[in-house]
Image: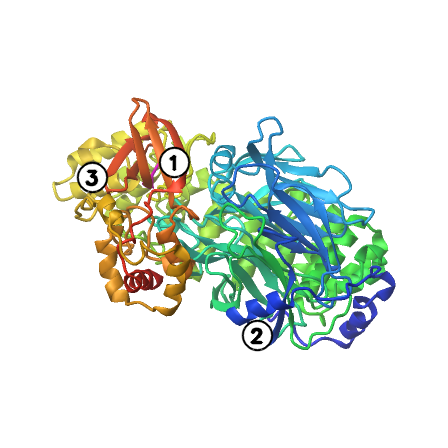
């Protein structure tokens, strides 16, 4: 990746002196006299790993910001904290608010605070000028139950620290109402960030959303997680990427590279995946990321257990080089802010995860225009929130000197344009947002274009100016953006800007995109491919079909998990090409490509066309070739489109153990299903006995349900868990059973324990009835193979001694009542749209058809009984904890 910030020009230094310390436009300040959090800061510093070159101190405690679920900082330095005393699993209204904190002179001491607004379950905040965007849960005043989630915007025009009036709603129904009401917000829609392209990017968790509606009246439904974007006025809503799990935020760099930190299943492992997000990309969770990995863009790394939360791309010249120009990703489960230095790899990146700042249950991170970073932490508030726990800390580099940032709403257009030359992303963004709110005249837009042309500027500044110009001028600016595609430094970004607003597509010429498809620069080529799909340039279909399919486009062996978190730069261009061919509805062209050098690209694309013409063409192609390999590809393509996903109505989909088999979650037949079925059966009937085995594999992989083919048993030989007499275990009394929990925890501080002895105790104490530590074993209850990466020693011990104290995601007990009155209580260990498996406390598994379920609910209790460690000595419990602590 281009180095984002080089040595400043002399002009930039002049800009810094003239405008960043614009004291004539800074706020009135009445600073507090004393710092009240000295002891708390010292206590945290003594127990946590903080970089020695940073000054970290508590800025506000739980008295002001309990259970801070999210946070945003304005360029001016106002800190907006989303307080959520209900937590992620609470279901009651009236426990949330946005609290505004102000340090008016930058000395690290909180000077004033206000309750800016009351909102339930705040999950994302964005503070720009006098506008504060909030993503939150909407409750019904009549029923007091969660209805859905909305994106809203508050204004504070009189600057009194309190929102002026009722917020304006930008998008309604941004989540799944069924699961939001039943479970809470922990898998719902989360953080919001503003890109320098002027779009608000929204992190959608795996609840997805149904009929989300923007101010244009556009309606969208998303099955599962991904990234949604919308204009700041609540219009032009569209899906950016799909196939993510429970992302909480996005980190966006100055060149519009986007990064996320999501994970896989809770209850079955919480593996964290760090991903580079490319527009239109499919990332595969949960249906493709295991068994159809050739079809997805893989994550850049799997770093093991964790739970990603807030994100920030740090681009600020005042920060040490070791931390700057880096995605920073908070991990609630690991209690760390991580940095992920990224290195260019063709159209994507590679990365290196590094621990940065330790903070218990960190939830969010942001920075202001002066270079002050803030972090928020739950610090033990738990899944149900707390009125007494949580805080915000302030972080600056040692030796940093405060220079107050100007209130951009008070600056002239000329000064705002100068701020676009700042080396700091927050400054450029604030200046751009203010310019866009003014809709200035030709003189201002011409001055901005001169920055675009100014080759002495670094790329981030030129790109900021380009996107500012594009948004201000609309149709009138297209010609100049076309000119910019001839500048090799700006070509990628000019192409993106030209294709950014679909409402302008009719005015954008095709030629710059057709030319860029031939570029040797993979980033330019990627931008051109995406743009072709967005603009509907059908004359590019022939070029697109010429794209080669790499050898890495290879399905994993049946029943095995493919490489879904290994960088694969060579798959990016063909993947984006397929997404664009689908967007262009290139059915006829793909049919014409069969039997040519374009066959492989056409067949890959046909996997997403449920079109009778495709089926007829594939069957015809099969009958006219003797090429065995070609015939096999045709059969697999037909099997891939044998079913389709039905329209989503919120009555099915979500679970902490979702069906990951793929390629669909809930299947339905379509018009050509009978034709495909007849064709496949006909080929099976003439196949030799040896060749018929391939049809059993086909039937298993694609879940065709064709009985005569048979299936392949993918389950490893296993023995049902031995029945365990947990009552007998918990009724035995030893040192642990005769002591208070406080005494036990104190004892564990001085007793290390023996992990090998702990492994034996894991079996002896009946843990194996409900848990496994090996991902290759059949899953039972909550997976323990990564518990050491998401819980510290004390939390593990507390969960054993008091299992109802804090029930983690995926650990909840489920009660199911069938239509015939039968009742089951246990862990749901596998689930699809048609059936689920529940395992009770003795380890007995039962498969249940979802159609037979009358009622299903999560109980506010753990299935694990208290007292299972009663018979142990302190040394034995320490050994069990030490064993579990090693599981990472």
Which residue is label 3 attached to? 711
Query: Which residue lies most toward the front here?
Result: 738
Looking at the image, is mark 1 or mark 2 nearer the viewer?
Answer: 2
Question: For the N terminus, which image quadrant?
Answer: bottom right
Q: As drawn, is 53 to the left or to the right of 475?
A: left
Whole-angstrom CA distance, mark 3 to mark 2, is 54 Å
Q: Is residue 517 visible?
A: no
Q: As drawn, is 258 to the left or to the right of 726?
A: right
Which residue is label 2 attached to? 322
Residue 486, located in which quarter of the rendered image? Answer: bottom right
- Residue 148 x %, y %: 56, 35
For the image, the number of numbered tags is 3
- Determine the secondary structure under disc 2: loop
Q: Callout 1: 10 Å neighbours few (<14), some, many (20+)?
A: many
Magenta residues span: 829-833
- Residue 262 x %, y %: 47, 53
Which residue is label 1 attached to? 614
Q: As drawn, is 362 to the left or to the right of 806?
A: right
- Determine the secondary structure under disc 3: loop
Question: For the C terminus, which image quadrant?
Answer: bottom left
Looking at the image, is mark 3 or mark 2 nearer the viewer?
Answer: 2
The question of residue 832 being in magenta is answered with yes
- Determine the secondary structure under disc 1: helix
Q: Is residue 570 visible?
A: yes
Q: Which mark is residue 132?
A: none
* Secondary structure mainly formed by the magenta segment: strand
Looking at the picture, tell me which residue is in the foreground, 468 or 492: 468
The residue shown at (72%, 64%) is: 109
Query: Which residue lies most toward the right here?
Result: 24
Whole-angstrom CA distance, mark 1 to mark 3, is 27 Å
Q: Vertical placement of 488 versus 608: above or below?
A: below
């Amino acid at each position: 990746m281009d180095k984002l910030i080089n040595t400043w020009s002399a002009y930039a230094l002049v800009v810094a002196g003239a405008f960043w310390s614009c004291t004539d436009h800074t706020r009135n300040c009445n600073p507090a006299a004393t710092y009240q959090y000295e002891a708390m800061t010292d206590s945290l510093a003594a127990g946590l790993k903080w970089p020695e070159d940073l000054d970290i101190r508590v800025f506000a405690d739980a008295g002001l910001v309990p259970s801070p679920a999210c946070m945003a900082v304005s360029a001016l330095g106002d800190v907006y904290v989303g307080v959520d005393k209900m937590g992620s699993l609470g279901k009651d209204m009236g426990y949330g608010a946005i609290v505004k904190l102000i340090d008016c002179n930058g000395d690290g001491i909180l000077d004033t605070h206000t309750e800016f607004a009351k909102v339930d379950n705040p999950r994302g905040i964005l503070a720009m000028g006098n506008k504060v965007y909030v993503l939150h849960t909407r409750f019904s005043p009549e029923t007091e139950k969660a209805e859905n989630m909305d994106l809203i915007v508050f204004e504070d025009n009189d600057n009194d620290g309190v929102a002026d009036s009722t917020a304006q709603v930008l998008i309604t129904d941004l989540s799944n109402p069924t699961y939001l009401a039943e479970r809470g917000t922990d898998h719902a829609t989360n953080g919001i960030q503003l890109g320098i392209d002027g779009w608000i990017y929204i992190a959608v968790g795996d609840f997805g959303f149904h009929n989300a509606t923007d101010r244009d009246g556009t309606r969208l439904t998303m099955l599962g997680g991904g990234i949604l974007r919308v204009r700041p006025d609540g219009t032009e809503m569209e899906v950016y990427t799909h196939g993510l799990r429970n992302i909480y935020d996005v980190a966006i760099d100055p060149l519009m590279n986007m990064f996320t930190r999501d994970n896989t299943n809770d209850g079955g492992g919480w593996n964290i995946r760090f991903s580079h997000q490319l527009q239109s990309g499919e990332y595969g969770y949960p249906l493709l990321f295991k068994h159809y990995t050739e079809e997805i863009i893989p994550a850049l790394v799997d770093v093991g257990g964790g739970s990603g939360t807030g994100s920030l791309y740090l681009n600020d010249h005042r920060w040490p080089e070791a931390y700057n120009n880096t995605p920073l990703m908070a991990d609630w489960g690991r209690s760390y802010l991580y940095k992920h230095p990224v290195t260019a790899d063709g159209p994507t990146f590679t990365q290196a995860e590094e621990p940065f700042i330790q903070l218990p249950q960190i939830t969010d991170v942001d920075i202001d225009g002066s270079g002050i970073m803030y972090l928020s932490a739950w610090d033990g508030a738990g899944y149900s929130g707390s009125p007494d726990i949580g805080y915000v800390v302030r972080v600056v580099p040692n030796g940093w000197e405060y220079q107050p940032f100007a209130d951009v709403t008070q600056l002239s257009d000329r000064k705002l344009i100068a701020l676009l030359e700042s080396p700091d992303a927050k400054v450029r963004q604030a200046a751009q947002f203010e310019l866009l709110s003014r809709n200035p005249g030709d003189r201002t837009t011409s001055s901005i274009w001169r920055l675009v042309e100014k080759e002495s500027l670094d790329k981030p500044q030129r790109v900021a100016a380009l996107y500012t110009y594009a948004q201000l001028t609309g149709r009138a600016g297209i010609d100049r953006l076309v000119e910019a595609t001839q500048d090799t430094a700006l070509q990628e970004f000019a192409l993106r800007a030209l294709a950014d607003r679909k409402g302008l597509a009719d005015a954008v010429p095709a030629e710059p995109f057709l030319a860029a498809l031939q570029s040797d620069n993979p980033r330019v080529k990627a931008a051109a491919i995406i743009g072709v799909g967005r603009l509907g340039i059908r004359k590019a279909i022939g070029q697109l079909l010429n794209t080669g399919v790499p050898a890495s486009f290879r399905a994993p062996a049946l029943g095995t998990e493919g490489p879904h978190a290994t960088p694969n730069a060579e798959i990016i261009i063909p993947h984006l090409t397929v997404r664009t061919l689908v967007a262009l509805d290139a059915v006829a062209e793909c049919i014409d490509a069969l039997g040519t050098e374009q066959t492989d690209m056409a067949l890959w694309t046909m996997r997403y066309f449920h079109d009778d013409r495709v089926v007829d063409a594939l069957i015809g192609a099969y009958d006219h070739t003797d090429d065995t390999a070609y015939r096999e590809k045709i059969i697999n393509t037909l099997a891939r489109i044998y079913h389709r996903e039905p329209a989503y109505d919120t009555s099915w989909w979500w679970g902490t153990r979702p069906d990951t088999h793929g390629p669909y979650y809930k299947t339905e037949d379509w018009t050509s299903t009978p034709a495909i079925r007849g064709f496949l059966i006909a080929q099976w009937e003439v196949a030799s006995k040896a060749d018929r085995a391939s049809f059993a594999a086909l039937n298993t992989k694609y879940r065709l349900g064709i009985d005569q083919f048979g299936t392949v048993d993918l389950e490893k030989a296993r023995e049902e868990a031995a029945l365990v007499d947990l009552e007998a275990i918990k009724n035995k009394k030893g040192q642990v059973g005769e002591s208070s929990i406080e005494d036990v925890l104190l004892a564990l501080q001085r007793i290390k324990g023996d992990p090998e002895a702990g492994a034996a105790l894991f079996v002896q104490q009946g843990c194996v009835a409900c848990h496994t530590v090996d991902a290759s074993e059949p899953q039972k209850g909550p997976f323990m193979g990564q518990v050491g990466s998401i819980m510290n020693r004390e939390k593990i011990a507390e969960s054993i001694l008091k299992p109802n104290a804090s029930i983690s995601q995926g650990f909840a007990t489920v009660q199911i009542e069938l239509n015939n009155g039968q009742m089951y209580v246990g862990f749901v260990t596998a689930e699809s749209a048609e059936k689920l498996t529940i395992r009770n406390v003795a380890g007995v598994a039962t498969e249940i058809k979802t159609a037979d379920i009358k009622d299903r609910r999560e109980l506010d209790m753990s299935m694990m009984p208290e007292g299972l460690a009663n018979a142990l000595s302190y040394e034995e419990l320490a050994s069990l904890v030490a064993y579990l602590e090693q599981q990472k």
